[in-house]
Image: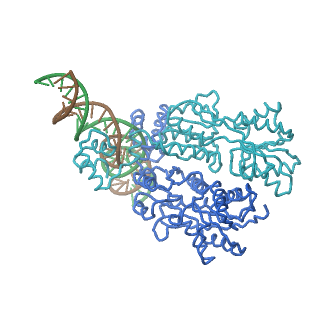
Chain colours: A cyan, B blue, C green, D brown
Amino acid sequence: MDIHDIAKISGYSSSTVSRVINNRNYVSEKARQDIQRVIKEFDYVPNEVARDLSKGKTHNIGVVLPHTSHPYYTQLVEGIMSAAFPAGYRIVMLPSKFDADIEMNYLNRLRRKAYDAIIFTSHGIPIKEFLKYQQYGSIVICHNPGDYNIAAAYAEREESYKAAFQWIQAQKYQKIAILLSRPYEVSSTAQKTFQAYRQIFNSNPDKRLLNTKITTFEDGYNAASQFHKENYKPDIYFTNGDDIAAGVRQFHLDNNLPIPKLIGQENQLSGKILNIPTINHNFHKVGKLAFELAINNEIKQLPVESEFIFRNQEKL
Amino acid sequence: MDIHDIAKISGYSSSTVSRVINNRNYVSEKARQDIQRVIKEFDYVPNEVARDLSKGKTHNIGVVLPHTSHPYYTQLVEGIMSAAFPAGYRIVMLPSKFDADIEMNYLNRLRRKAYDAIIFTSHGIPIKEFLKYQQYGSIVICHNPGDYNIAAAYAEREESYKAAFQWIQAQKYQKIAILLSRPYEVSSTAQKTFQAYRQIFNSNPDKRLLNTKITTFEDGYNAASQFHKENYKPDIYFTNGDDIAAGVRQFHLDNNLPIPKLIGQENQLSGKILNIPTINHNFHKVGKLAFELAINNEIKQLPVESEFIFRNQEKL
DNA sequence: TTAAATTGTGGAACGCGTTCCACGTCAAGA
DNA sequence: TCTTGACGTGGAACGCGTTCCACAATTTAA
């Protein structure tokens, strides 16, 4: 039962039926009624895929995510969805694990018209690769693209990072551990962190107190354990998330050790509960903006300021 | 540039080109090479939507979610994705806010072949409605469907709830506050909760200590505040999530009040940090099973046992 | 009253792969 | 030698809406 059947049965052409379905003008009242009656009688509904094919548009936005369970992505996705839903777009989740092949595959799916646009919440392939694919649909990334001419909505971390390090400096903490999720070489976040560190302390972070493979509470716990085993005793931990900082705290608690100072990120509930200072990156807003760039096909860059939120950890 | 162009240029028919693209048999080595050369030369990629249309399959699974930011859904989605990705399926996020019209709309999208299957992580419309739509694609819900013949993967909460209430009874707590997310009338979870309560205590929960609109940390905080204002002083809070329980705790902490006993749910990080006893519903597994039901189009019911995880809150 | 604009409707092509069926060729088995 | 059967390939229909163009019938403006 397709639109042509309805046409035949109702005695009109498929053009007219199509007009009725999409309630457009240039249909007489009689035709509208006749056709609607037939549609109702045969309980016809148009096929969405055929419509997408013929319109060349799916209203689906691909969202590439390295992992699904981490709050950075959850918040971003939520931001994207909150904007996409009212606009009649839908989000297709594309897990990538930072794998270049998988990412390329998604880029090719964009080319094959599976999505109207694609948002990379994070990416493993070099930005250069994206440029070639822009002609096939809009591509938005969620990191600072530097000089590359590619649409981007992202957290502008500089100032907040500097503020955090400035605070650390003011407190005269000496041994500063840094727990990040991905290594310097591949992560602009790590680069920004180091950059801010250098600007404040005029030196590089202590490599021995650095771990760049930390994403969860457990990771934080284990990293702290490791440092302790090696007899490094950081005064303060600058971490990539409140949950991670909470893990660090937990390790010390479980072992009856004094709890070092902590700085989290992403303004997670754990930080709120434990009164851990944090850095709020406003990912919800970033997601919203990313979506807007995606559907408007605008190639511009929208930084969103992050903010250092001080909390008095002592009060806990 | 479509498959017919490639056919013309290479001097073969579109059937043969199609065979090459999908590397199937019945293609001579020469034809394969000729065609592949042309494909490469003109940088041709097939259109995904056309393929979906002609195959009648999209490999997209719709996932309906009332809200996006709550851990129940996050875990479920993660479980679904972890199974969908290796199987070559993708997840389309369909926010619903429990709105019946929106849900019906998604059901109709299934009918229109936009998705191969649809998973309702939660639903506002009565189960009966689903039955009519099963003919259009597989539908899976994440609640106990009772006697309805509909595919379902869900947390079997009975035993864990009873265990929790038994524990409460053993401790001789008298004033039991209950904080749930949705009212009895519309929520099978609430019904299970009450049922378990009755089985243990032989009475109904105290209406004055009941609030069924609680989903977040803040909600928990405010509910506790409300009870306090009304001068009810619950001995223990049975809540719908560790984060909620954490909110209750925070209220008492902020006001220098003794912290009541707490029971959370969903085994969230907040509960782990604060040593709040919880109920783990294994939603990750539920999601996985839901996906499997969805693609195998099996109409069966797969309960997943929940477990009461006792933690000694005193130790905090 | 005539020219111009608007309304109503159909035909057919388009968007683009997939697949069934038919037909020819050639080699292996009877 | 004759029959199967596997192999290779093309034609055309199918899946299903949308839309451009043409044409007739009115209505409106001049």
Furthest residue to the front? B230
Answer with left or right where residue A259 lies relative to residue B139: right
Answer with left or right where residue B176 lies relative to residue B59: right
Tell me where residue A63 sits by quadrant: top right
Q: Nearer the viewer, residue B312 or A151?
A: B312
Residue B96 spot, x, y in % from top left: 49, 53
Residue B40 spot, x, y in % from top left: 50, 34
Say if B220 sits above or below B8 in the image: below
Say if A29 sits above or below B138 in the image: above
Residue B276 spot, x, y in % from top left: 72, 62
Q: Nearer the viewer, residue A67 or B47?
A: A67
* Residue in the image at 75% along x and 36% along y: A163
The answer to whether one can see residue B288 in this image is: no
* Residue in the image at 78% along x and 37% along y: A165
Furthest residue to the right? A231
Say if B39 sits above or below B80 in the image: above
Furthest residue to the bottom? B202
Answer with left or right where residue A20 lies relative to residue B261: left
Answer with left or right where residue A151 lies relative to residue A276: left
Q: Tally the marks.
A: 0
The answer to whether one can see residue B242 in this image is: yes
* Residue in the image at 89% along x and 48% along y: A231
Residue A277 spot, x, y in % from top left: 75, 45
* Residue in the image at 74% along x and 45% along y: A264
Q: Nearer the viewer, residue B122 or A39?
A: B122
Q: Nearer the viewer, residue A88 or B232?
A: B232
